[in-house]
Amino acid sequence: MLGAVADDFTGATDLAMMLRASGHRVVVAIEDAQLDAEQLEAADAVVIALKTRTAPVADAVSRSRAAISRLQGWGATRFYVKYCSTFDSTDHGNIGPVLDAAREMLGAQRCVVVPSLPANGRRVREGLLFVHEQLLEDSPMRHHPLTPMTRSRVADLLRPQTTGEVAEIHRTTILEGPDALRAALDEAPAPYVVLDTDTDADLATIGAATGEDVLVSGGSGLALGIPGPTGAASDWEPPEPGRRAVLCGSVSAQSLAQIADAARTQPVHVIDVRAAATDPSAAAAQILEWIDAQETGAIPVVCAARTREDVLPAGALGETDPAAIVEAVIAGVAGGLVGSGRSSALIVAGGESSGAVVGALGATALRIGPEIAPGVCWSLAESRGRTLALALKSGNFGGEDMFTTAWEVLG
């Protein structure tokens, strides 16, 4: 069995969807959830969804170690550490320390580093990470409020975070095929090797070359190159959605564009973060009243911001983290919608917000369903005695019309 650890919830569902596409039967386990024998027997791959992308390093390492240990107990023999395809992290961030801990636990001599996801425009060329033909440092990720990305060479992003050396292998070698790449990896003078990737065919080559490696790492794209032993079952049976709603804590450029698109036809409510800071529960209750007041067929959008100017900077609320307030409000709204039976289908945008919602709903496992867009899918969870359809979306993923068109895929 393949065991994977993802550093946020949207990343976990993204990876699970890719594993399903490559022929794995896959289940996503939420943080400390325990899977029963029947769930494990039905899975070729298990992804544990953590919430560690921006957690303190020691916390991220401890929780990742615990996840790997749990996967070992469930019978995993190969392991995958999943991080964002834009390598979201700082010089003091978590990717390197988590990889160091995983290598030590598993006795892995090397670990490839493959953030690329060509389907979403993430490619590594000559060691440099591009986002839709822009260098990472020139992309909107340069202005990310938590992990601003101001460099593009992946090795330079990883080196400050790890005790191991970092090498690169460029695409000329990958184009020579799996045997040539495997030989180059065996000769690499470092435990971490950043691999160029421009197409899905490159991912297939990398998957074949690393098929015997105990540990690999990357974005979700690498999963497309790891063939599964079975075909994915077509067992999707969505619940009746009831009130549809979008809860968007992300303030990425793509999420803001998606909100702007939805606002042309749907009601939008921006969370008053300053007011909510004193009582997030009261703010959530007020938003639920606003949702109830909308027309039955409307798709209300609750968001942290509509424009970049709406985003409160760090320190604007003193010691209180504005992002934490947004997460608390969104989690409260989700809990109200699901707990009352108003809704059994939600789109949640943003990794941290998705984690907060899943936690508030008490969901412990996700069964992966149909793809909405590259890196985004519907999934099923059990919450408070009800079956719930969730689309957990990374802030940067999905087309601009996703908040209004994803429901067509739900069925």
Image: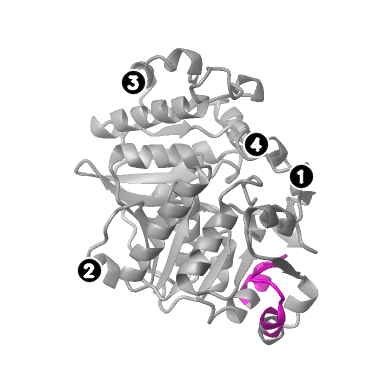
Q: Residue 300, relative to residue 106: is it above or below? A: above
Is label 1 in a helix, a strand or a loop?
Answer: helix
Q: Quadrant of the N terminus?
A: bottom left
- Residue at the location (41% across, 76% down)? 77
Per the rendering, the mark at residue 37 is 2
In this rendering, would 17 be left or right of 206? left
Query: The disc labelled 4 sits on which kind of residue?
Result: His
Q: Position of residue 159 (x, y in %)?
A: 69, 57
Question: Label 1 belongs to which residue?
Answer: 137
Residue 260 part of the magenta-drawn span: no
- Residue type marked 3: Ser
Question: Which amino acid is tagged 1?
Answer: Glu
Secondary structure under tag 3 reads helix
x, y (%) of residue 64? 44, 56
User: Quick one: 299 or 232, which is closer to the camera?
Assistant: 232
Few, some or many C-alpha atoms within 10 Å of disc 2 (few <14, some 14-19, many ≥20)?
few
Q: Kindly state the secondary structure of the residue where label 4 is placed.
A: loop
Disc 3 target residue = 281
Of the residues under marks 4 and 3, which one precedes in the sequence? 4
